[in-house]
Image (cartoon, grey):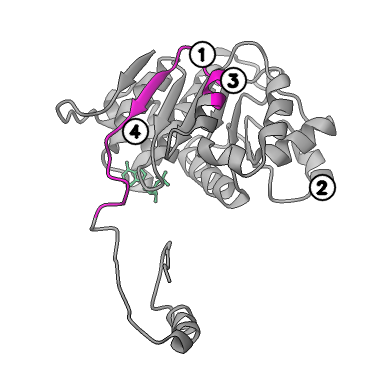
Amino acid sequence: MAEDTGNDEKVVFPFHEMGLDDRVLKAIAKLGWIKPTLIQERAIPLIIDGRDLLARGRTGSGKTGAFCIPLVQRILDVKAQHSSQTALQAIRGCVLCPSRELARQTFEVLQSLTSSCGGIIRILDLGTKDVATMKPLLSDVPDIIVGTPGRLAEHLKAANLNLDALTNLIIDEADLIFSFGYEADLRIILAKLPSIYQAILTSATITEDVTKLKKLVLNNPVILKLSEPQLPDSSQLSQYVIKLEEEDKLVLIYALFRLELIRGKTLIFV
Ligand code: AMP
């Protein structure tokens, strides 16, 4: 097991030196991502190399791109190897997230990253409709599925899809998967996977649950413990303290949101 703390000299390994397909590079440029974030710089080459990975990365670190870019690259490589795409159409990539909202955001990143691929990569967000309504979309066999373990387990139980050809499993925010009560669903999913696949776990913290999950899904992984600050950079984060009487709290909160004085992800401590 190798460990990378990212503490050595700051190398900037640009996207165009990572062996990525031109269509992926074009999509990255369209997103306005000029250079990789630290986690992307370290994780993408390892994932492309086929390694299993446990990456400690908080929201805002660019972790979604770090696992989505090599996933899209992998699917393009597989498609390039086989001339008859319809015969070999199968679910090859699966991204599990602890919430529907996170799954939707990951789906959107994947869509952006495949925007220059001319529709040859199909991605499905399992959370958009109920299980029965989703069935016809699954019979159309997407290349990548994104969803919560709960929703995927429901589809497996209903035999709406099979994961026999899966090559890439990603579990995002792995520390929350167990605490959100998905352990049983995850076990149902793992039982349906082929014996060999590449697995990636991302997690903001390395908890006991993550260590358990690591043992369950990762094979000789590289551990990326990048020493990034736990909070976003000060250019991305504003902090305020407002002192007021107890009875004014509700009206102040109401006014802040109603007048859209606060935008973006917000944490309020009272
Ligand atoms: P994440 O940590 O994956 O939730 O990403 C946080 C934000 O960073 C998202 O808004 C991404 O669009 C953005 N982002 C990801 N990678 C890059 C990059 N290489 N350059 C600039 N922004 C990025």
Alpha carbon distance from label 3 to label 2 = 32 Å
Q: Which amino acid type is marked by label 1?
A: Asn
Circle 1 or circle 3, nearest the eye: 3
Alpha carbon distance from label 1 to label 2 = 36 Å
What label sits on residue 133 in the rendered view? 2
What label sits on residue 40 in the rendered view? 4
Q: Contact, CB < 8 Å: mark 3 with mark 4?
A: no
At numbered mark 4, what does the secondary structure look like: helix, strand or loop? helix
What label sits on residue 216 in the rendered view? 3
Q: Earlier in the sequence, mark 1 or mark 2?
A: 2
Quadrant of the image occupied by residue 265: bottom left
Residue 184's x, y, as percent? 72, 32
What label sits on residue 219 in the rendered view? 1
Label 4 residue near ligand 1, CB within 8 Å: yes
Label 2 residue near ligand 1, CB within 8 Å: no
Alpha carbon distance from label 2 to label 4 = 36 Å
